[in-house]
Structures are given as C-alpha cells and as structure tokens.
Amino acid sequence: MGKIPRIPLVEWVDKGEAWLKVNAKWFFDPIKNILGGFVDKLSDGLTFIPPILFILIVVILTFYLTEKKWGLTLFVFGGLLLIQNLGFWEDTMLTLSLILASSIISIVIGVPTGIWMSRSNTVKSIITPILDFMQTMPAFVYLIPAVSFFGIGMVPGIIASVIFSMPPVIRLTNLGIRQVPKELIEASDAFGSTEFQKLFRVQLPLATNTIMTGINQTIMLALSMVVIASMIGASGLGVKVFQAVTRNQAGEGFASGLSIVILAIVLDRITQALNSTKGVSSE
C-alpha cells in the first residue's frame, strides 16, 4: 500500500499569509489606524479621569444598578481603592480600554450577525461551524495572524480578543430571538406589523435577557485575553502578570493578578445588574 502524500496545509497557510501581507495592506492598514486611534482616545479618556472620581462614579453606578446592595457596593469601593493603592491604576485603565474596545466591536458585529442567523436557517448552518472554530481554536493561535497583519501593540490584542470573545453574543442573540413564542410573532403579524416593527418591538425586547447574558460572557472572555494579548505588546495588567511570570516574582504576579480579578468581578456584577434592570423594565 502506497504512502499517502502529506497535504501541504502549512505551506498553503504560509503562502496565503504572505500574499495577504503584500496585497491586502489597503484593507488592514485602515483597520489598524482606526482601531489604534479609538483605543488611544479611550485609554486617554479613562486615565485622564482622577482615580477617586472614577471610583465614586463606578460605586454610585453599582449602588443604583444593584438596587442598593451595600455588600457589593462596598466591595467595588474597596477593590478599586486597593488597585489604586497597589499602584496599578493606570495599567487597570489600559486593560479596561482594551476590554471595552474589544467588547464594543464584538457587540456591534455580533448582535446584527445573531439577528441575521435567527432569520435564516441557511445562514445559521453556515455561521455555526465558524463560531465553533473561533471558540475551539487555542487563543494563542490568533496572535500569529494578528501580529502579521497589524504589528505589535494594542491593535492586534484587540483583534485577537474580538475573535475569541465574539461567539457568545452571536449565539445568544440568535437563541434569544428564536425562543420568542410563535404565538406572539403570529399576533404581531395579525396586527400588520412590518419586519422592522416585529424585530424591535417584539423579538429584541423579549430576547434582551438572553442577549445581555451573551454580552456578559463576551466581556469576560475579552478579559481572559488580557495576559495573552500582553505577549504581543498590549499594555495593561497583563504585562505586569507576564513580567512577573518571566522574572519569577510571586508578589508582583499575585498583586497584578488580584487587580485583574477585582476588575473582572466589577464588570461581571455591573453587566449582570444591567441585565436584571433590563429584565424588570421589559416586563
């Protein structure tokens, strides 16, 4: 039995990457410039706000959204004060700008894609394997094309984070709209609603809780990319963790890692509270 020839997949990918680097600069360069400008403005705005003022804003927002839960509010206040006291405030704001930029892009692309999937089984059958690929591919792999096409810095970190964190918001937007009771859809059709009215007055309001759950998961996945993105030059707390690992500095690693945990809890609780608020208002 003859030996089966090896499929030259590695060579195909390398040649495709080389061709894109030369012939698709018109596509990648504007993206790099736009995203770079956006994240720079975002990080400049966050670092411009005095820490105590930022902490007070987040504490008041948490207190209002969580319906006056003092325990969580005090945790947010103490946690953010601890980050500031440890000297990681600027790094935290840079990390937050990376997370916000990645999450905003994921939501802007993901929600319309999820709506599109919910309206066509053909589109769903095409996009679902792509989402499976995006979620199962190791996150480190995304760093290679990101660096090749966008260089070193925050932009490739955002691109890799978007690819890794976008699937939940797409999947749950699709799921939420598909779970809207058919009786309500038929009733809206009976009243002569247009497709636009049916989507924005019936389907999206009823799917809000599910969509917000997807947004919450997307934000958490973007946060999980912080340390990985630091390997390709993304600034923030991830750099501190990565440096501590390479230098075997247990204290520095624990302190910077604790700051990431505090930021994750704050973002998670605020988005969950927003979900609860939306759920109450939609009822």
Image (spheres, helix red, strand yellow):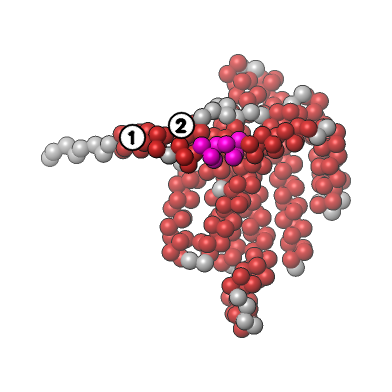
Name the residue: 64% across, 28% down. Answer: 235
Quarter-of-image position of residue 50: top right
Task: In the rendered structure, find residue 148 and report the number of the disc placed on it.
Answer: 2
Query: Which residue appears at 59% of the width and 48% of the height?
Result: 106
The amino acid at mark 2 is: Ser
Residue 220 x/y as whole percent: 64, 43
Of residues 149 and 92, the one drawn nearer to the viewer in this rendering: 149
Q: Is residue 112 left or right of residue 144?
A: right
Residue 66 position in % (x across, y down): 81, 51
Residues at marks 1 and 2, CA–CA distance in whole angstroms? 13 Å
- Whether residue 160 is visible to the viewer of this picture, yes or no, is no
The answer to which quarter of the image holds residue 244 is top right
Secondary structure beneath label 2:
helix
Was residue 163 drawn as part of the magenta stretch in this picture?
Answer: no
Q: Amino acid at mark 1?
A: Lys
The extreme bottom residue here reads: 190
Q: Work out whether 193 lies above or below 149.
A: below
Look at mark 1 in the image and give the residue it sits on.
Answer: 15
**What's the residue at 59%, 40% (across, down)?**
34
Does residue 14 appear in the picture of this structure?
yes
SS at mark 1 in the image: helix
Query: What percent of the width, then of the height, locates residue 138?
Result: 48, 38
46 left or right of 141? right
**Outermost residue, front direction?**
26
Proximity of marks 1 and 2: CB atoms separated by less than 8 Å = no
Q: Of the two numbered discs 1 and 2 on the same chain, state the one appearing first in sequence.
A: 1
The answer to whether residue 205 is left or right of residue 52 is left
What's the residue at 58%, 18% (across, down)? 246
In the rendered image, the quadrant that contains the N terminus is top left
Quadrant location, the C terminus:
bottom right
Which residues fall within the magenta stretch? 29-36
* Quadrant of the image occupied by residue 240: top right
